[in-house]
Amino acid sequence: MTHASTTDHGHGKDLKAGHGGNHGAGHVHVVPMRLLIGVFVVLMLLTGATFAATWVNLGYNGNLILAMAIAVVKAALVMLYFMHLRWDKPFNAITALSALFFIAIFIIACIQDSGQYKSNYERPGAGYSVNK
Amino acid sequence: MATATADQGHAGTGEHAHPPHLAHHFDSPEQQYQSGKLGMWAFLATELLMFGGLFCAYAVYRANHPEVFLYSHHYLDATWGGINTAVLIASSFTMAWGVRAAQLGQTGLLKVLMALTFLGGVGFMVIKGIEYQSKWKHHIFPGFYNAYNPSYFDKANKDAALQDAIDYRQSHISGHSAAGLPAEAVKDGAVDGGAGQGQTGKATVAAAQAAAATRDQLAGPTTRRGTMLVDPNAGTGDEAKMLPTFVQPVGLAVAQPKTSHAPPVELGDMNALSQSRINTFFGVYFVMTGLHGIHVIVGMGIIAWLFLTAGRYSPEYFTPVDLGGLYWHLVDLIWIFLFPLLYLIH
């Protein structure tokens, strides 16, 4: 622990980008401005692409997959750059990805499971009874 | 989150003074910062799981009842949704920039960016309010207050409310074509006639007959393209053999030159069971966007707090800005998925 010289430090103005963060204990990465702007522009373009994807017809499932693919790319950009995962300790990314992994299991299992007893809830009279 | 207040008079025990922002249970600012980040990510993972449950409900429902979603999504305006997406992405950008400003000690810029991010949240909620209000005017509420719900709370005016909701949807569809979007939808009558026959032709003839029979018995409010079957529990014998008559119409039923927009699914394309489930789409819609909206409001509170305490943050201590930013980005992330799933169903 090399905290010996931490008492008064004239930080602030004499800092250069790239240093910012807890002094004495290692540098914390500061995101370059150009990268932030670049990611923002790409995100906007991808939003436009999401709209454009509705103009092509790939079938019901095809359009869904395309829209989700674009959304995943956008999400990856936000997580890596805006949320700083690219330069963080990997365990933060592992935490987030494991949550997504379990959500995937949840959704896939539920769709498969419910699909198997469709005849059960498609019969007339299924569903809640009407309030008379 | 570590607090910035610590005993000022504490010159430090031992060989080193400790910075005022360092809480006593941490060894170093670095450890405090990393712990804060990890804790925040653990919280974000739980938030993801919470919304994941809602997305699962959406996915299961849509997988098993695609016709309900294809019918109902016409109530949602993709333009407003797209503007909301752009607003949230822009506010995420200003938030990330704000974290950078805090890291560099640029307090004035930090305040400006927090204010801009807050305004982004305001804009989002305003647009959301406009969208909700336009639905509520036409009896599209969650649960029992939804005109499509067979147990609609206002029995006396049920049919009128339902007819109003159906007409509103129709105006939405025609409004879109008036705006120059799929021109085919303008010829709704002609196209629906052709597409409708094509689609129901793909279903069993028995199903069509059964549907007609029940329709005659129980006709509720009508559209050009079908009648709302009022009682889903009054199945006829033929209906017992009936699976949902909806067949995915995309690109197959009608030749549409320049667009992928299939003719809108109409009430007549669904059996009674599916019609009774339309209000569930809105349940899903209102809960997901509503919960997301609550998160936006909470996020706005956090950003306002960051704005008010901006003077505390410096290159040595910017953790609260960083963690608040993570929360706001999560809100943006969730909307990035909500938008195509709810608004761009085709």
Image: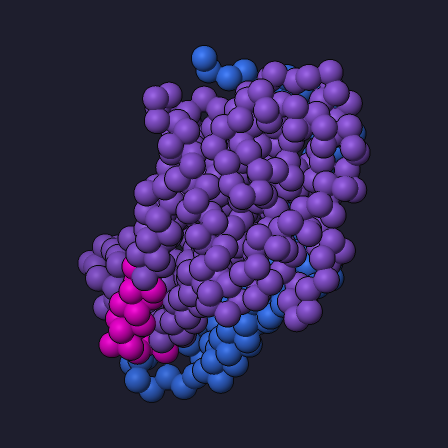
Point out residue B63 in the picture as x, y percentages from the top left corner.
68, 41
Q: Residue at x 46, y 65 (%)?
A: B178
Q: Seen in the image, is B119 located left or right of residue B88?
A: left
Picture quadrant of residue A16: bottom left
Which of the 4 image quadrants contains residue B162? Answer: top left
Relative height, residue B195 to residue B96 (above, below): above
Q: Is residue B299 left or right of residue B333?
A: left
Q: Quadrant of the C terminus of chain A?
A: top left
The residue at 53%/26% (across/down) is B219
Please determine whether, in this image, residue B333 is positioned above or below residue B146: below
From the viewer's side, name the closer residue of B218 and B102: B218
The residue closer to the viewer here, B176 or B6, is B176
In this rendered view, identify the residue nearer to me: A70 or B199.
B199
Q: Residue B281, percent across and down?
A: 53, 39
Q: Position of residue B36 (x, y in %)?
A: 45, 54
Q: Nearer the viewer, residue A8 or B44?
A: B44
Q: What span is in magenta?
A: B103-122
Instruction: Note the chain letter of the blue one.
Output: A
Give residue B187's position: percent from left, percent from top: 57, 59
Q: Colour of chain B?
A: purple
**Count of numbered marks:** 0
Q: Determine which quarter of the picture holds residue B241.
A: top right
Q: Main secondary structure of the magenta part?
A: helix
Q: Residue at x 37, y 84 (%)?
A: A15
Whether residue B105 is in magenta: the answer is: yes
The residue depicted at 42 percent of the width and 40 percent of the height is B165
